[in-house]
């Protein structure tokens, strides 16, 4: 498994398009957002103390003299696609993020065509440097976990190959903080138990882990031993991709009306998107990101799927209720509609249901028409906040 | 009696060198091996038994050969702890050549001196089992003033380590180059490759009396510049070709060096270890015939 990671991807892409940005601190943040937070920052800015998600005002105070650019997500996606295309020439099994410079490529079994895996990694990096102007970290391991952990060791540039059979020896001396997927609470518990290295964690069996960590004991047991059976997930193409919208609050909030209004607005955008694609979603997920960095995600499902705002709102409300389990103020909320399928052309079985549905559809169609002419924020349903939410 | 497959040192043959002008009769031990040992396709092609995992390959390799060239140190910086674990598990007779990392040969980053210091630390666990650090230079590394200065500085940084240099640009095939390598006791790698214009020629020049170093890349003319390793190194040396090489090159090399290594780089479909074993048999026959 090869892992490629372009550190500070957005910055790297911006520097390819404008070489005058090289060698100086750079912040990328949406300048016109109600609450502008850092989307990405250069290594120079990171060393000054800037982190992703930091309010821009704070970041600008910490790193005076930094250039600030708005994010150009479309450009970053193009760069991702260009590198994806090159990776795809070596393997059909590629997993990548949205526009974050991360890729996994499963090159198992390709040795007869392309030679040893380290050679593939080196060639792809060389191509990225020569053709795209970006310099990815690349790592090679027997699974995604090992490759991912290795890439955390070689930032901002470099490579790391973990030979088969070396996984346990590789992981043992490393701090548990390099393991992916651990929550803040789990890290705190590990600290409390003085389990600061992965080797120390691997010294415990499942029963011993079950007491403090409950159902997560299996996950902790496996990752501490370098065991990871997860497969590379191919990205959904075009219309298969989930609809994903996020709203960042101008101020951290625990006002239920405000959060429900934002979710309702995101539902409006999602519904319009589904109807445009002639798709229905069978699941709605709500992510809440808290001001302390924690996050909770919950879903609600609908067996038949829907693209109507009314049912989507009901599902989103259910998911929100399940997700909102803390008193900590909320920094942002996100709505994801997935498990998509084509809209069924079939009519409903009962005429009274059909009548109600037809009425709703007419309302939504009219709203979609208005939005397409005057912008999404021109009209909303009920207590949604207009002018809320952008697509991720 | 020389044996190509001694239980103690498989793939190691003592070549009898008859007395020559100014030189007494002597024995030159020659070890045969391959460039790299961890190839999944060597399981497919039968060199390793079916189902062999990567962790078992070095031990199995050591049953056939007494020297191996570590090529993964070219892709990534040598790491002492990983090398120490490898050496601990390796068969006791196995010697190692280690390729210098590409950041100092092909990419030549600005921080190459720091890289070199890290590399020296990284290969330290090999100790007395290190046959040579192999500096394989890229095809476009010609004999310009800048490149000569760079190579000189690199060799200075590798002092006290056994070093072999493989040139791939023909401009380095010059007497002043050989003289300088001789002065530094650096081995000039004897290369066997397709006879294509622009490549460094096949020579039997010995610049280091301690060691000669031969690398067999295969003679695939069509695949050589394809950009695909599986084509470039897809070649099976015939018995006749190996015997011809031994007749023309081996004795001149063995006569002037204390020991030698011959490493096969045509890894595709396990042709390298197959040819290596053939070579060891031929060397043994040669040695027996010489007595």
Image (cartoon, helix red, strand yellow):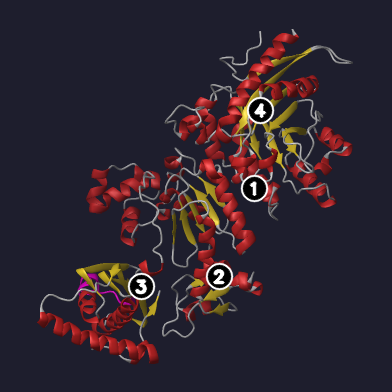
Q: Nearer the viewer, mark 3 or mark 2?
A: 3
Q: In this view of the protein, which residue sits in the foreground, B192 or B7?
A: B192
Report if residue B46 is visible in the image: yes
Tag shown at residue B227: 1
On whether residue B2 falls in the magenta region, the answer is no
Circle nearer the N terminus (3, 2): 2
Element under label 4? loop
Give the spatial CA distance, label 3 vs label 2: 23 Å
Element under label 2? helix
Q: In this view of the protein, which residue sits in the foreground, A178 or A78?
A: A78
Question: Residue, x 62% and y 62% (percent of image)?
Answer: A131
The chain holding disc 1 is B
Question: Residue, x 59% and y 14% (percent of image)?
Answer: B6
Q: Nearer the viewer, mark 2 or mark 4?
A: 4
Highlighted range, magenta? A318-333
Q: Are marks 4 and 3 on the same chain?
A: no
The chain holding disc 3 is A
Question: Residue, x 71% and y 30% (percent of image)?
Answer: B214
Element under label 1? loop
Report if residue A383 is visible in the image: no
Q: Nearer the viewer, mark 4 or mark 3?
A: 4
Please give left or right for residue A249 compared with residue B136 in the image: left
Residue with the mark numbered 3? A244
Residue with the mark numbered 4? B237
Residue with the mark numbered 2? A11
Give the spatial CA distance, label 1 vs label 4: 21 Å
Element under label 3? strand
Q: Nearer the viewer, mark 1 or mark 3?
A: 1
Q: Position of residue A135 (x, y in %)?
A: 59, 60
Circle nearer the N terminus (1, 4): 1
In the image, farthest residue toward the front = A346
């Amino acid at each position: 498994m090869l892992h490629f990671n372009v550190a500070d991807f957005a910055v790297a892409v911006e520097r390819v398009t404008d070489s005058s940005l090289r060698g100086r601190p750079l912040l990328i943040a949406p300048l016109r957002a109600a609450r502008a937070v850092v989307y990405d920052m250069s290594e120079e800015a990171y060393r000054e103390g800037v982190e992703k998600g930091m309010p821009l005002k704070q970041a600008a105070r910490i790193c005076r003299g930094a250039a600030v650019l708005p994010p150009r997500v479309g450009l970053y996606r193009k760069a991702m696609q260009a590198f994806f295309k090159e990776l795809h020439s070596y393997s059909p099994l590629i997993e990548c993020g949205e526009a974050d410079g991360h890729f996994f490529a499963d090159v198992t079994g390709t040795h007869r065509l392309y030679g040893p895996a380290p050679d593939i990694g080196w060639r792809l990096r060389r191509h990225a440097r020569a053709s795209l102007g970006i310099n990815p970290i690349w790592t090679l391991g027997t699974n995604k976990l090992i490759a991912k952990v290795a890439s955390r060791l070689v930032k901002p540039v470099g490579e790391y190959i973990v030979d088969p059979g070396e996984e346990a020896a590789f992981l043992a001396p490393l701090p548990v903080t390099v393991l992916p997927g651990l929550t803040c609470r789990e890290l705190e518990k590990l600290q409390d138990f003085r389990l600061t290295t992965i080797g120390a964690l691997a010294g415990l069996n499942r029963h011993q882990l079950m007491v403090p960590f409950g159902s997560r004991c299996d996950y902790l047991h496996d990752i501490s031993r370098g065991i990871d059976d997860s497969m590379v997930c191919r990205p959904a193409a075009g219309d298969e991709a989930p609809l994903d919208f996020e709203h960042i609050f101008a101020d951290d909030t625990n006002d239920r009306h405000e959060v429900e209004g934002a979710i309702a607005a995101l539902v409006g955008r999602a519904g319009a998107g589904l109807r445009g694609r002639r798709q229905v979603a069978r699941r709605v997920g709500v992510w809440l990101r808290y001001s302390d960095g924690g996050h909770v995600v919950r879903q609600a499902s609908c067996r038949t799927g829907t693209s109507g705002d009314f049912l989507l709102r009901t599902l989103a409300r259910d998911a929100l209720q399940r997700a909102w389990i803390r008193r900590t103020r909320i920094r942002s909320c996100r709505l994801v509609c997935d498990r998509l399928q084509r809209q069924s052309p079939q009519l409903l079985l009962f005429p009274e249901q059909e009548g109600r549905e037809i009425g709703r559809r007419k309302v939504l169609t009219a709203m979609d028409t208005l939005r397409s002419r005057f912008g999404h924020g021109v009209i909303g349903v009920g207590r949604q906040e207009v002018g809320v939410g952008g697509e991720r | 009696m020389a044996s190509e497959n001694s239980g103690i040192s498989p793939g190691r043959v003592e070549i009898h060198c008859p007395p020559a002008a100014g030189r007494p009769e002597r024995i030159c031990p020659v070890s045969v091996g391959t460039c790299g040992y961890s190839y999944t396709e060597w399981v497919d092609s039968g060199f390793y038994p079916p189902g062999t995992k990567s962790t078992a390959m070095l031990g199995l390799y050591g049953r056939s050969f007494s020297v191996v060239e570590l090529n993964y140190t070219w892709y990534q910086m040598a790491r002492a702890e990983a090398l120490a674990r490898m050496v601990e598990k390796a068969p006791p007779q196995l010697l190692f050549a280690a390729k210098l990392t590409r950041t100092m040969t092909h990419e030549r980053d600005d921080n190459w001196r720091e890289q070199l210091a890290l590399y020296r630390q990284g290969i330290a666990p090999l100790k007395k089992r290190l046959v040579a650090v192999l500096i394989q230079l890229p095809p476009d590394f010609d004999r310009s003033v800048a490149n000569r200065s760079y190579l000189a500085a690199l060799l200075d940084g590798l002092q006290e380590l056994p070093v072999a240099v493989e040139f791939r640009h023909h401009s380095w095939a010059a007497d002043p180059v050989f003289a300088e390598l001789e002065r530094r006791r650096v081995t000039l790698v004897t290369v066997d490759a397709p006879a294509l214009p622009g490549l460094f020629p096949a020579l039997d020049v010995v610049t280091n009396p301690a060691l000669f170093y031969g690398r067999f890349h295969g003679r695939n003319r069509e695949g050589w510049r394809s950009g695909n390793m599986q084509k470039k190194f897809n070649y099976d040396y015939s018995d006749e070709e190996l015997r011809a090489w031994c007749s023309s090159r081996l004795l001149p090399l063995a006569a002037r060096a204390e020991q030698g290594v011959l490493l096969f780089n045509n890894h595709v479909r396990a042709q390298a270890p197959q040819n290596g074993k053939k070579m060891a048999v031929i060397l043994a026959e040669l040695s027996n015939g010489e007595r």
